Amino acid sequence: MEKTERNAVRVVEALVDSSPRLEARFQTNDKTPLVDGDIWLYEGDIHTNATVESRVPVQIKGRAPTKKIKRKRTSANFPVERDTLRFLMNDGGGLYFVVIIEQGAPGRAFYAVLNPYKIRRFLDRMPASQETKTIACKPFPSDPAQIERIVRYAATARRQDAREHFDPADLDNVRSLTIHTLGDIAFDRPTLLNPDETDFLASVETATGATLFIDGSLVLKPQSYIPHEVGLTVRCGAVSFTHAVVRQLSPSAAELEFSAGIRITLDSSNDGRVSFKLNMELAGSIADQLRDAEFLLAMSGGEPLFFDGEPHHFDDTAQLCRRDELLRTRDQLRMLSDVCEALHFDPHAVNLADVGEREKADLHVLHPAIVLNEEIAASPNGAGRYTLALGERQLVLVVAAGSDDSHWRVLDPFDPRNRHELRLLRVLDGGDIQEVPGATIYEALSVKDLATTLNLNLEQILQAYLDVEDTNEAKRFATARILALIKAADAAKADRDPLLRAADALNEWMITGGDDMPIHLINRWQIKLRRKGLTAQDNTAIRKARVESIRTPDENSNLRAVCYSILLGDVDEFGLALEDLTASELDQMTDWPIWALRPQPSMVVMSA
């Protein structure tokens, strides 16, 4: 056995020393614990202390099989003790050799690079009762350049520290990625690097200059295989897409995504002929799905696809989708789009994936009532407000009595043509019902309603107040609605600007009507700050207003001082102004929408 080990060491030593930049320093007496020596790597042919680059510990095991082994064997397995693995992991790893020694034949060396992360995976997967791990070793080459490449790889692997664990969050701060591998990487197609199957090292350099090794699999994709948007105009029939998301699927195939519901695959692998495959699933808003359905109908009718104006004909496009079914779907979507138009809201605003089947059916029922102004037959449930939820948004409608007890009319309360039929009522303490004079339909809506209702018809909101006979009452209600609209804009998840434009229209009506009270000027500035930001001229006007407020104080001066400091972003003044507020004034201030623009608490130190 001892002779087999000595012969094994000599085989590896001869192979290593064939490389001019390597030097084997092995022990042949097998007395060194755990390792059998080191391979030293030098900068060049001259081996001195000054030219040493690194060293790699090695362990060499000799095997003298009793049966003849095939000379073309591509691997050799050898059990390694748990303690040896743990030592190598903590010591930075190294090269593990298994040498087959046969009578009358040259020794054949097999190797495995045991780097810290690989060993850690071995140990983590070993049951507590398992004392050895069988290591698969590959044939060690005889070419000096390849041998040097393996040793350099093993030397680099020693920079890993098994005590470190890579945090994927570190990828957010990466300057570069470096990959070392003993094999070749195909950069013309996606490549999976699995540490259980491939010898590779991946490290990243962070923005701070630190180098971190990655422990795990990597998928390398050429840029063309990553979905990316291109300025490609694709037209079929009357429908055009001006952009497409493209990704390569193989050297001969690519996928083009025109919308969330339409993807086509073009493949030229069949003798250069381009085959066509359609992936279709209507998705997105009412407008998106209607557009996609029109596009698909044109395709199913055999019309060519125009790519940047150049026509392309594909075989069997008529068989790619069921035309009759598409026609029905298109007609249903047109009805929904007509309802949106009649209710004055954008069909892009409703994602049908968020709408339940019952709500979709109710939308279709609205078509004759809203678009065709017909009565609908329904069981009597009483007249009044009717709210239809559409995902996180809603429609607010009014159900009114029809020509008989079994028919009803559905009205859009925000349509100016219906104002003469609507009255806002309130219940008095005694239970009596009283009309609210000077109120519009918008007074019936909460801030949440304003933030979520689709059919507000905000372009007509100013006219609704102008139509009120009592101008003073209209302005009183409008003042409160301005604040509610600003709050709704802050709460809205979409379509924020129309709410701010509506608030601005009402507020400017107040100012141009001669009511340039400070509260309306503050509203003008906070609306502008939310929409476009304040100009230097605005900031000067705010400072002048602050000076005037100090010069001519009144009961609301303290409140205005806080508002001015918020608008100017003056953190110090904001903190001082807050100290002057009473408890009731602070409650009032925190209820105003301008409070949402205040400096963050961490920026302000408030005294007790």
Image (cartoon, rainbow, N blue to C red):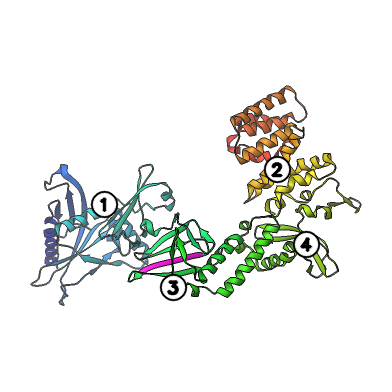
CA–CA distance in space, label 1 to label 4: 76 Å
Q: Secondary structure at mark 3?
A: loop
Q: Is residue 487 visible?
A: yes
Quarter occupied by the C terminus:
top right
CA–CA distance in space, label 3 to label 2: 56 Å
Amino acid type of disc 3?
A: Asp
Q: Which mark is residue 410?
A: 4
Which stretch is magenta?
262-268
Which residue is the site of mark 2? 503
Quarter of the figure with residue 547? top right
Q: Secondary structure at mark 1?
A: helix
From the top left corner, tell me how far across and down residue 173 is, in percent: 41, 46
Query: Which callout, 3 or 2, points at the residue further toward the start of the chain?
Result: 3
206 horizontally vs 284: left or right: left
Query: Which callout, 4 or 3, points at the residue further toward the start of the chain?
Result: 3
CA–CA distance in space, label 2 to label 4: 28 Å
How many residues crowd mark 2 within 10 Å: few (<14), some (14–19), many (20+)? many
Residue at coordinates 15% horizontally, 56% vertically from top-left? 26
